[in-house]
Every structure is written in C-alpha cells, then in structure tokens.
Amino acid sequence: MRLLNAIKSDFMFQYRQGFYFIYIIITLFYVILLSRLPQNILNISVPLIVFSDPSMLGLFFIGGIIMLEKTQGIINCIIVTPLRVHEYILSKLISLTIIAVLAGFFITAITYGFSVNWLLLTLVITLTSVFFTLTGFLISANCSTLNQYFIKMIPWMLILIIPCFSILEFKYSYLFTVIPSVSLLKLLIGAFNGINLYLALILIIYMCVINYYFLLRVKKVFEEKILYGGQ
C-alpha cells in the first residue's frame, strides 16, 4: 500500500511540474522526425529513437525530480514517514518506466507499425528505463543543484552512448556488448529485426543482474549521501 501511494504521488508530482507536457512534446517531435525518414531505414532509426526515449527520460528527468524534491524538502520528510528508502526508489523507477513504455509503444505503432516483437520490446524499454534512471540516481547523489547535475551527467552520457556506435560492426565490436547501453541497444534492435533467442536471454539476464546491482548501490548511496548526508 505504501508503494502504491508513493507511485500515485510521483505521478501527481511529475504532472504538476510539467514533466509530462515536456515528454509529450518530445515524443511528438520524434514521431514527426521519423515520419519524414525513408521507409527502408526505419528498422534502424525507430529502435534508435525508442532507445533514446527512456534513456533521456531516466537521465534527464530523474535529475530534475531529485533536485526539485531536495529544494522542496520532500526527501527530508522520508525520514519521518513510514515510506522506506527502497520503496521511494522503486516508486520513481515504476512511474518513469510506465511513461517510457507507453511512449515507446506510441512511437513504434505510429511510425513503424505492429510487426515487432512486443514482448521483447516491453522488456528492453523497461530494462533501459530502469538502468538509466538508476544511473541518474547515482549522479544526483553528489549534486546540490540542477546545473551541477547536468554538468556531471555529460561524462556519463559519453561513456554510455559513444560505445553504442559498435553496432556498426567493426573488428572486435562484440567486446563492447559488456557495456550495458550497448547490450540494451542490441536487444532493442533485435525486437525490430530479430535476434538469436539464446543471445537475447543472455543479454536480458545480464541486464537484470546489472540493474539489481545498481539498485542495491543506489539504495546505499541514497541513504549515505542524500537522505542522511544532508545534501
């Protein structure tokens, strides 16, 4: 019940702060952009856009949410409420992931159609949203302002996004699959173009392990540096 109430509160908070309006505008921009691209490249361009959608939502929005809740004193109130730290984190993950999945479905259905692996697409968008949102949590731990967060986010984005160019397939490009963002992008492209079942299972299990580790790490860092650290 605590978790459900926290999720409802997160939806309301994000709505009041205008996050959904911004996200709708961005999603419509993506749809317009993709509708102008040649049909023969949509099987690559649509997965790239759908991948960037939860990535952006997780990294950009969680930073803004955490900084706003810090300045409004919401985070400090967690100490005196029954809500536990892991429930607070899960609430953010669930609320942002639901929006990411809905946006991904909308972009895919409008610009590409329904000839995709919807189960795999759902799993990958979920894993992608969770990974980047948790990454945003980790970045925000050492930040006290939104500008500071965006500055510290840049190197993380470079580390995670640049290796994604390995999908162009060059010598030893398969080595980059160990980087979570590359694994997620390969899975997402596989939802549109097909992927070996065993490879998909390995990458999904790998990302579940990574996300679980990040979740434990975020809980520890959140308690030490944000909740009780007084930042």
Image (spheres, rainbow, N blue to C red):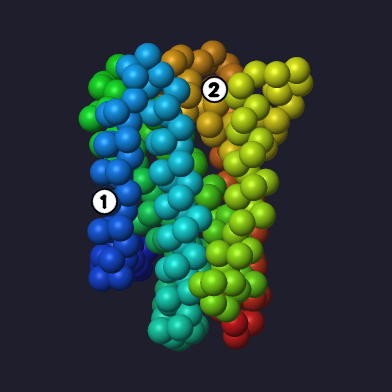
| Residue 181 appears in the rendering | yes
Q: Closest to the observer: 91 or 57? A: 57
In the image, residue 22 lies at what x, y percent? Answer: 30, 58
Which of the two labelled residues, at mark 2 and mark 1, occupies the earlier sequence position?
A: 1
Q: Residues within 10 Å of mark 1 (few under 14, many from 20)?
A: few
Q: Secondary structure at mark 2?
A: helix
Disc 2: which residue = 200
Q: Which mark lies nearer to you, 2 or 1?
A: 1
**Residue at point 75%, 17% (across, down):** 171
In the image, residue 156 lies at what x, y percent? Answer: 64, 53
Q: Residue 207 is drawn in which quadrant?
A: top right
Q: Is residue 168 above or below residue 181?
A: above
| Residue 209 appears in the rendering | no
User: How many angstroms separate mark 2 from mark 1 (CA)?
Assistant: 30 Å
* Residue type beneath disc 2: Ala
Q: Are marks 2 and 1 in contact (CB under 8 Å)?
A: no
Left or right: where 110 falls relative to 155 = left
Q: Secondary structure at mark 1?
A: helix
Left or right: where 178 falls relative to 137 = right
**Residue at point 42%, 27% (across, down):** 45
Left or right: where 4 falls relative to 161 = left
In the image, residue 55 lies at what x, y percent? Answer: 48, 46
Q: Residue 184 is drawn in which quadrant?
A: top right
Q: Closest to the observer: 43 or 221? A: 43
Q: Is residue 100 above or below residue 226?
A: above
**Residue at point 43%, 77% (across, down):** 69
* Residue type beneath disc 1: Ile
Q: Is residue 217 above or below residue 207?
A: below
Disc 1: which residue = 24
